Image (spheres, helix red, strand yellow):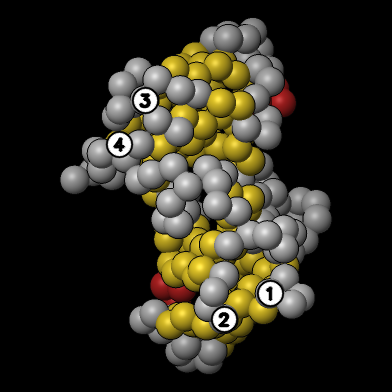
């Protein structure tokens, strides 16, 4: 039981390049999330998927797209990377919608955009 | 407590002492709260949670206190150990999908 896994761990991009961050969970959770974390700030929600087949914008969706590929996998795509997207990206999952349960986080992807 | 800007507040405690980390939450309708621990280079890790119908909950060496009157949450760590050094942050939820996270407090344990 690996929990939430993310790939890659580190990535360096040039401005304008594209990339996809991968996330998978093996806990049979319905909900999945993408956050970014910047120095001195709390986690900010980019997109979430309450259940397979649905996705919704969070607080900071601009410049990103997501795909809920199946119940296990939720990917985050940067179509044209910008330096402002330099951050640490965390994927999380949670059992149910509206449930008073915690989210479980992956180890993060550290992205540097030059 | 919470902070604005790039610098996290830091709490330095002596090994073996008790630590108290504070959090002011924003939404009086929030009904569920979590404390997370984040070690350097890792993802946040669940420590303890509390529902709004409670004002105290205890775990192993940790206690969370909730004061809904002043919208304040605290995390108490007993007999702080070097392995407790990390950033701690709170999160609130209002019967919904999404959590709101505080920026965190850095706990530094002195030998």
Q: Which chain carries label 3?
A: A
The circle drawn on residue B68 is 1
For image coordinates 44% across by 17% down, the residue present is: A67
- The local crowd at label 2, few if under 14, some if 14 to 19, many if 20 or more residues have their Cα within 10 Å, is few
**Viewer-nearest of labels 1 and 4?**
1
Disc 2 to disc 1, how far (Cα)?
Answer: 8 Å
For image coordinates 63% across by 59% down, the residue present is: B30
- The local crowd at label 1, few if under 14, some if 14 to 19, many if 20 or more residues have their Cα within 10 Å, is some
Disc 3 to disc 4, how far (Cα)?
Answer: 13 Å
- The local crowd at label 3, few if under 14, some if 14 to 19, many if 20 or more residues have their Cα within 10 Å, is some
In the displayed image of the protein, which residue is found farthest to the right?
B4
Image location of residue B93, percent across then percent down: 58, 54
Sequence order check, earlier mark of 3 and 4? 4
Sequence order check, earlier mark of 2 and 1? 2
Q: Which chain carries label 4?
A: A
Q: Mark 1 lies on which chain?
A: B
**Cβ atoms under marks 2 and 1 closer than 8 Å:** yes
Image location of residue A6, percent across then percent down: 37, 33
Look at the numbered disc 1 and give the secondary structure of its residue: loop
Do pointers 3 and 4 mark residues of a single chain? yes
> Would you say A80 lies left or right of B61 here?
right
| Residue that badge 4 annotates | A25
Disc 4 to disc 2, how far (Cα)?
Answer: 33 Å
Look at the numbered disc 3 and give the secondary structure of its residue: loop
The circle drawn on residue A52 is 3
Where B1 falls versus B19 (above or below)? above
| Residue that badge 2 annotates | B55
Look at the numbered disc 4 and give the secondary structure of its residue: strand
Residue B50 seen anywhere in this rendered image of the structure: yes
**Cβ atoms under marks 2 and 3 closer than 8 Å:** no
Disc 1 to disc 4, how far (Cα)?
Answer: 34 Å
């Amino acid at each position: 039981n690996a929990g939430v896994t993310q790939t890659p761990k580190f990535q360096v991009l040039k401005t304008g390049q594209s990339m996809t961050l991968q996330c998978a969970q093996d806990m049979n959770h319905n909900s999945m999330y993408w956050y970014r974390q910047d120095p001195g700030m709390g986690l900010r929600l980019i997109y979430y998927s309450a259940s397979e087949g649905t996705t919704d914008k969070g607080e900071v969706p601009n410049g990103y797209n997501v795909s809920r590929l199946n119940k296990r996998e939720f990917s985050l795509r940067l179509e044209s990377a910008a330096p402002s997207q330099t951050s640490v990206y965390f994927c999380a999952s949670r059992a149910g919608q509206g449930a008073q349960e915690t989210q479980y986080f992956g180890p993060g992807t550290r992205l540097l955009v030059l | 407590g919470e902070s604005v800007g790039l610098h996290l507040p830091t709490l330095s405690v002596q090994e073996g002492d008790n630590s108290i980390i504070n959090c002011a939450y924003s939404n009086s309708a929030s009904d569920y709260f979590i404390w997370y621990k984040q070690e350097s280079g890792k993802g946040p890790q669940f420590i303890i949670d509390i529902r709004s119908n409670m004002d105290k909950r205890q775990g192993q060496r940790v206690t969370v206190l909730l004061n809904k009157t002043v919208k304040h949450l605290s995390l108490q760590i007993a007999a702080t150990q070097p392995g407790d050094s990390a950033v701690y942050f709170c999160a609130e939820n209002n019967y919904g999908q999404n959590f709101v996270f505080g920026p965190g407090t850095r706990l530094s344990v002195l030998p």
